[in-house]
Amino acid sequence: MRTYEDWDGLLARAARHGGRYLAGLPSRRVVPAAGWDAGALGGALPEQPQDPHEVVELLATAADAGLTATGSGRFFGFVIGAALPAAVAADVLGVAWDQNAGLRAASPAHAAVEDAVERWVLDLLGLPPTATVGLVPGGQSANFTCLAAARDAVLRRAGHDVARDGLTGAPRVHVLVGAERHETVDRALRFLGLGAPVPVAVDDQGRVRPDALTDALAAVPDGAPLVVALQAGHIHSGGYDPFAELVPLVHARGGWVHVDGAIGLWSAASPRLRHLVAGVEEADSWSTDAHKTLNVPYDCGLAVVADPGALRAAMGMQAAYMVPTPGDALEPFERTPEWSRRGRAFGTWAALRSLGRGGVADLVDRLHANALRTAAGLGSVPGVEVLNDVVSTQVTVAVGDDATTRAVVDHVLADGRVWLSGSRWRDRAVLRVSLAGWATDEDDVDLAVQVVREAVEAVGAARAGG
Ligand SMILES: *Cc1c(COP(=O)(O)O)cnc(C)c1O
């Protein structure tokens, strides 16, 4: 494997399989068929080296039946975005380049691309141009990164140095979160040694209630270190905390506001939907995903912190072999918990560059329009109740009692033409439809509605018959 012909042959083989898969998405079963054969991928480790062509061929053929077509226009499960063409191709190139993106000196080209992504993202999301952006593996890790900066900053203000003393002897950090925050916020707080947060009551769309936050803040001792995590884009309702009302309440108490905007922060890029995030730019940190709404291939999340010094204080480190860059620019590793990492900015750069400002706004608007069409369609199916105000990309419905809803979910998944997720919200079994992929069009939405309609009828008939 040294010549251009060698590499071209091998990469072309992988690209051919990838291209065939992607082109086949419109007609492919979304859900892997039950009982697909994982055997060929297992077995004993070969004793001797194998031909790379055979390895790629085996992977491509043996894995195929077990792939979930998350990039299909008919995938509405969890919140999983598809992947934009330019981003897919740029990531393939990035893998061939195999850059270590942790240090500017180790890849000046990646650093330049990452700096461009930082500027473009802050601009599109309407966040302070002086903020900094860490490219992390996803929303979980973005929440962790931002909340680490938050923890250290609020303790520093209270005279406690976490870098030197750890949490031993530190004053308690009061952490308040919406009662329906994403579980990854709790997990990040656990990793950070902050324990379980105090939940603040929410309204019927899962949005933090200003009166409840006022009460919860009143219970925090004056001057105590304080972090409040809010949310842009609830996984069931798609709803947004009322930032313009909430953020000043926290700042008046000297607290740090973090916003988990994994799905929803991108509404800021749409002139039509920007009102949903009004006031969000006043927060202190924001996490979002590039691999959900922006449709970059996995894995890419964005950890945004208003004060770059606070992020550097939490993430920075010194090593004898580092090559310092002159000036104030943060090193990539000073913005993330990773040291060595892949060049994940390439895919995000390509997604943004290929869409442009107008394309990002169109993508966000189209996901919302699809959600509205889904809700209208499902709402017309007898027995189906739409439970949320469809303000963004999420539609959550129930079909009568919990047992019926669950039976409908099972029926839809067994059907295999579309993938919707079952879940629980507000103490009810629900069926959740996430509009997260660029490839979904109106026909896909109508098919999803039709599959649910058939499932509701089949479950009803089975009930009547049984
Ligand atoms: C998906 C999601 C996360 C976690 O993001 P990952 O990219 O899966 O790590 C966090 N918060 C919310 C609201 C999400 O939807």
Image (spheres, rainbow, N blue to C red):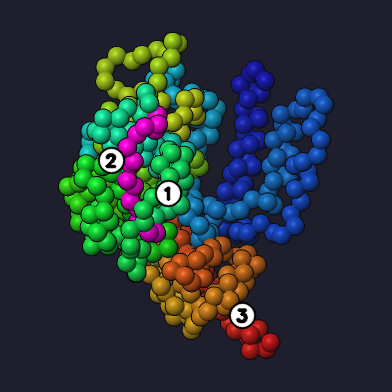
Cα gap from disc 2 to disc 3, whole angstroms: 53 Å
Sequence-wise, which precedes: disc 2 or disc 3?
A: 2
Dominant SS of magenta comes to: loop
Which residue appears farthest toward the bottom when viewing the image? Answer: 464
Query: Residue 215 in the image: x percent, y percent?
Result: 24, 59
In this picture, residue 239 sits left or right of residue 427: left
Marks 2/3 in contact by CB < 8 Å: the verdict is no
* Residue 146 belongs to magenta span: no
SS for dot 3? helix
Q: The residue under label 3 is which amino acid type?
A: Val
Residue 90 picture location, percent across and down = 47, 35
Foreground residue, 321 or 44? 321
Q: Which residue is labeled 3 in the image?
A: 459
Q: Callout 2: few (<14), some (14-19), or many (20+) C-alpha neighbours within 10 Å? A: many
411 or 120: which is nearer to us? 411
Compare residues 462 and 191 and report the one nearer the observer.
191
Q: Is residue 37 left or right of residue 419?
A: right
Question: Looking at the rendering, in which quadrant would you find the C terminus?
Answer: bottom right
Left of 74 or right of it: where is 416?
Answer: right
Does label 1 or label 2 sit earlier along the sequence?
1
Mark 1 touching mark 3, by CB under 8 A?
A: no
Residue appearing at x 39%, y 33% in the figure: 167
